[in-house]
Amino acid sequence: MYNYFFLNITVLCNLKMKITYRPEDNNFCLKSIASSKLSNIEIIQICLLKDKNWKFGIKSQLKGFKNNIKKFDLHNLFYIKSKLAGYTLLRKRTCKIQNLKKNTHYLLLDTLIIDKKYRGMKFSNLLMSFNNTIIKQSGFSSFLICKTESVGFYKENNWTKLSNKDFSVIDHRFSSNGMVFNEKENFKKYIFFINS
């Protein structure tokens, strides 16, 4: 539905720290902002949206944000008439590739969420199209972990499922699926670090 979405975009860039797309009809707005450029209001909006899905309380969400978010992480915000309706976190992390001698960076796609009020309207595809555009502009590859029932959605949005023998995650236990986007080359094996 949104494959053509970014062909006619006017993007405003501020040192690659803040990118905003606002269509002519102004019904919605997409922003990508580095942690260091987020306002306190935006942080509260993100935590309130997350708490609708993962009910730990706003104090816990704010504490988790403060303790776990790094200054170069990217926050992709989807607004409908000034209300935060969707959110994705792209964390800049480290990856080791078996046939390279040095570590490289990648973007961990984390926390894709659409407000329950706006689900079933294909807004998740719209946000993923924006995420993919930001990932491509960053020049990094991206990796995510997802449940089996979500694999089809990410494949529909041009992500590739990795075979379990082709990757490992050193500092995070999981028993689900790994997927990549914007893969630069066909490497033999990825070793991902989630927390560094």
Image: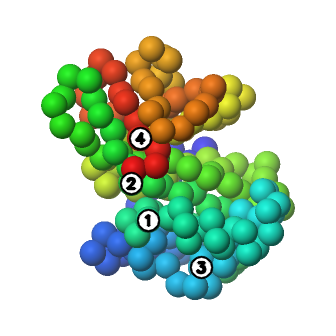
Residue ID at (79%, 57%) = 53
Residue ID at (70%, 49%) = 122
Secondary element under disc 2, as helix, strand or loop, is strand
Task: Report the residue that reaches farthest toward the left.
Answer: 101
Where does the image place residue 76, in percent across and percent down from the top left?
52, 63
Q: Amino acid at mark 1?
A: Lys
Q: Earlier in the sequence, mark 2 or mark 1?
A: 1
The quadrant of the picture occupied by the N terminus is top right
- Residue hosting label 2: 92
The reply to whether dot 2 and dot 1 touch (C-beta < 8 Å) is yes
In the rendered image, the vertical position of residue 104 relative to residue 28, given as above or below: above
- Residue hosting label 3: 42
- Residue hosting label 1: 70
Q: Amino acid at mark 4?
A: Phe
- Residue hosting label 4: 193
Q: Earlier in the sequence, mark 4 or mark 3?
A: 3
Dot 4 alpha-carbon crowd within 10 angstroms: few under 14, some 14 to 19, many 20 or more: some
In the rendered image, the vertical position of residue 89 relative to residue 136, given as above or below: below
The answer to whether residue 140 of the structure is visible from this angle is: yes
Where does the image place residue 48, in percent across and percent down from the top left?
74, 72
Cα gap from disc 2 to disc 1, whole angstroms: 8 Å
In this picture, residue 195 sits left or right of residue 177? left
In this picture, residue 144 sits left or right of residue 106? right
